[in-house]
Amino acid sequence: MMWPRMCEAILGLWLIAGHWILPNGAGPDWLVINDMVGGALCIAVAGFSCLVSRRPVNLLQIPIGLWVAAAAYFSSPTPATAVAQSDLLTAFFLLNFAIIPTRATEPPARWMAEVDGRLKAEGGR
Amino acid sequence: MSLSLDINAPPWKYNPSSWSQRLPICALAAVAGLIATYMALYQWRVIGSVWDPVFGEQTSKVLDSDLSEKMRHWMLVPDAALGAVGYFSEALLGLAGSTRRWQFRPWLVILFGIDVIPLGIVSVILVVLQGTVVGFWCFPCLVTAAISVLLVYWAYDEVWSSLRFLKQVWDRTHDRTVLWRTFWGGAPPEAVALAKELG
């Protein structure tokens, strides 16, 4: 089950699409490009994590989430624009998903080997 | 001998990481998240009023209070929206991991505890501030605070089992590397031997 990565891909899509749905008001124009790049990276990392599901590639979402949050927080006028608020909340969710392993409900690989009894079968490793 | 995925976690006579233990926590956290989202929708003025069967108009006064506005000024998003993120985060962390995660992924269980316990404390503080600083009461806020406290009560057993397992690994090895690897879900032989004693 790779549901954390699917959710990250949806969040990436939302980062890209949000600008057409929510008003940016007095927010800076560069935030549009920033969010599109962030969203695309988010989708790419989620896809790559699924390909190498035993490796912690998903942790790459953490710097992306931090960057999206920081850009929204420090560039937003007061009161915050809808896009900035959306970016902040999306980044918080992204950070949450990022720490969840790709094979979310399975034991880690080394413990999984013990569960399967594979180590014994292979004579130890 | 291979390890079972569903065993009792000492000192309890049940498995605190089993789905029957975790799913209710996730469901309750999701309910609190939905209530917080409802209040956030009012703070965003997506909805014009907020329903409160007990305190009536007082809820909107709490959500529109100076304290709430100040928090929004600092954090850019309404406090109820941040609360919703916190509750949904609890639900997510509750869903992650196997039915033996208290032993296989101590970091995840301890992070879950770190998420649940401070959120419970913050909820109680916000409820106290409602009565003392704002001077009004908010029934949905009280419900979410009650859920937070209940979640702390429900979640602590799993966190305790994880901490107990890590202490057992430390007592047996006195090796920081082994403890570190066990914490992050590695399976050092010492931790595996300990786990196998349980089945």
Image (tube, rainbow, N blue to C red):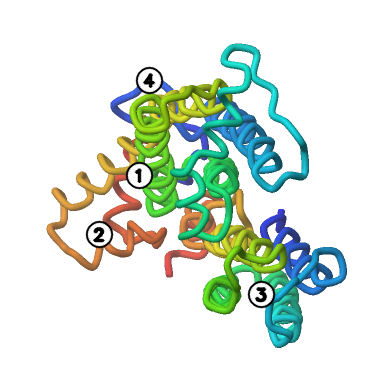
Q: What residue type is labelled 1?
A: Ala
Give the residue displayed 61% in from the left and 58% down from the top. Answer: A93
Q: What residue type is labelled 4?
A: Lys
Q: In which quarter of the image is the N terminus of chain B?
A: top left
Q: Is circle 2 on the same chain as circle 3? A: no
Q: Is mark 1 on a helix, strand or loop?
A: helix
- Toward which corner of the image does residue B35 lie, by quadrant? top right
Q: Indicate the position of residue B44 as horizontal and vertical percent values.
A: 69, 48
Mark nearest the camera among 2 and 1 is 2
Q: Pointer 4: what residue?
A: B13
Q: Is mark 2 on a helix, strand or loop?
A: helix
Distance of label 2 from label 1 (alpha carbons): 14 Å
Q: What residue type is labelled 3?
A: Val
Q: Pointer 3: what residue?
A: A52
Callout 2: few (<14), some (14-19), or many (20+) C-alpha neighbours within 10 Å? Answer: many
Q: Which is nearer the N-term, disc 1 or disc 4?
A: 4
Give the residue displayed 44% in from the left and 51% down from the top. Answer: B108
Callout 1: residue from which chain?
B
Q: Is circle 2 on the same chain as circle 1? A: yes
Q: What element carries label 3?
A: loop
Distance of label 4 from label 3 (alpha carbons): 38 Å
Disc on res. B29: none
Q: Which is nearer the N-term, disc 2 or disc 1?
A: 2
Distance of label 2 from label 4 (alpha carbons): 25 Å
Can residue A121 be seen in the rendering of this structure?
no
